[in-house]
Amino acid sequence: MEKKEMIYEGKAKKVFRTDDPALLIVDYKDDATAFNGQKRGTIGGKGIINNKMSNYLMAILEKEGVPTHLVQELSERETLVKCVKIVPLEVIIRNIAAGSFSARYGVEEGTPLKISTIEFSYKNDDLGDPLINDYHALALGLATEKEIETIKKYAFKVNDVLRALWAKRGVTLVDFKLEFGRLADGTIVLADEISPDTCRFWDAETGKKLDKDRFRRDLGNVEDAYTEIIGRLVDGE
Ligand code: TMP
């Protein structure tokens, strides 16, 4: 499958057309941004790690009944995926208070939540991805009621599968962000990526952060954390 013209370049990935209109090639970059692009940098080898992790986890999720965009890994940084129209919602699941949840509700980071939660942000960089509720999403026509129901069901299933998988590897899955897309026939599938850029991973013993918060918060040893977390995943088989 050959790469044709680039149709999109985001903060962390480039997307290319292929000979098949139903398939795209994603190419993962080492570029990192935070705070809606205000902070910029590179994390050496990140693209390779995120490509590998995302594909590894999506293949498992697919077997567990969550349809994904994954078709086939093509190289260290490139993956063939199904072409989708992204639903403009960032779907965030949380198991432990951290980040914007801790800040917004005044809950100390690390506080376990009584139940796992879900929230949506409207994916819109100009607005800074504002938090919205289901009614807002419906009112804005971002998704249908049935799509929102499906997205919630899949997101919690992803949480169940990944929480258990990471626990076996000595890692606490604190929270994560998912994006879903629609295939040409309207089927909802998990898209984008699942990586240290989009999840909070804490070492279960020490609480050490093994994700992009090391970059966001200038904690240092960013590359080492990415290398450690991908190692935990693949060596923990
Ligand atoms: P938050 O606590 O900053 O809202 O982040 C929640 C989760 O979402 C965390 O695992 C990091 C991830 N995330 C993204 O993937 N992209 C983003 O733009 C932001 C703000 C968070």
Image (cartoon, rainbow, N blue to C red):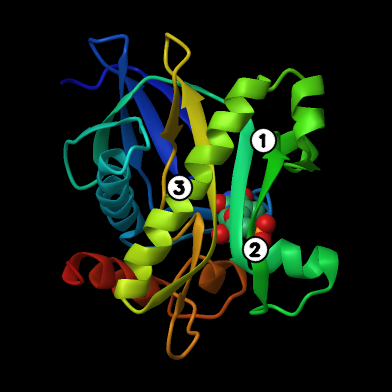
Instruction: Name the amino acid, label 3.
Output: Lys
Q: Specify whether residue 195 is in view.
A: no
Judged from this view, the residue extending furthest toward the bottom is 206
Circle 3 sits on which residue?
157
Alpha-carbon neighbours of circle 1 within 10 Å: few (<14), some, or many (≥20)? many
Alpha-carbon neighbours of circle 3 within 10 Å: few (<14), some, or many (≥20)? some
Whether disc 3's CB lies below 8 Å from ligand 1 is answered no
Is 168 placed left or right of 103 in the picture?
A: left
Q: Which one is in front in this view, the residue at disc 2 or the one at disc 1?
A: 2
In terms of depth relative to the viewer, which is nearer, 2 or 205?
205
Q: Which one is in front in this view, the residue at disc 1 or the one at disc 3?
A: 3
**Earlier-in-chain disc, 3 versus 2:** 2
Question: Height in image: 12 above or below 145?
Answer: below
Q: Position of residue 116 (x, y in %)?
A: 61, 60
Instruction: Name the amino acid, label 2.
Output: Ile
In terms of depth relative to the viewer, which is nearer, 1 or 109?
109
In the drawing, what numbered circle is on residue 115? 2
Q: Mark 2: which secondary structure?
A: strand
Tell me the distance, in whole angstroms, between the alpha carbons under discs 3 and 2. 14 Å
> Which image quadrant: the C terminus?
bottom left
Circle 1 sits on which residue?
123
> Which image quadrant: the N terminus?
top left
Q: Mark 3: which secondary structure?
A: helix
Q: Residue at x 36, y 68 (%)?
A: 166
Q: Residue at x 67, y 79 (%)?
A: 111
Q: Position of residue 147 (x, y in %)?
A: 58, 24
Tell me the distance, in whole angstroms, between the alpha carbons under discs 1 and 3. 22 Å
Q: Mark 1: which secondary structure?
A: loop
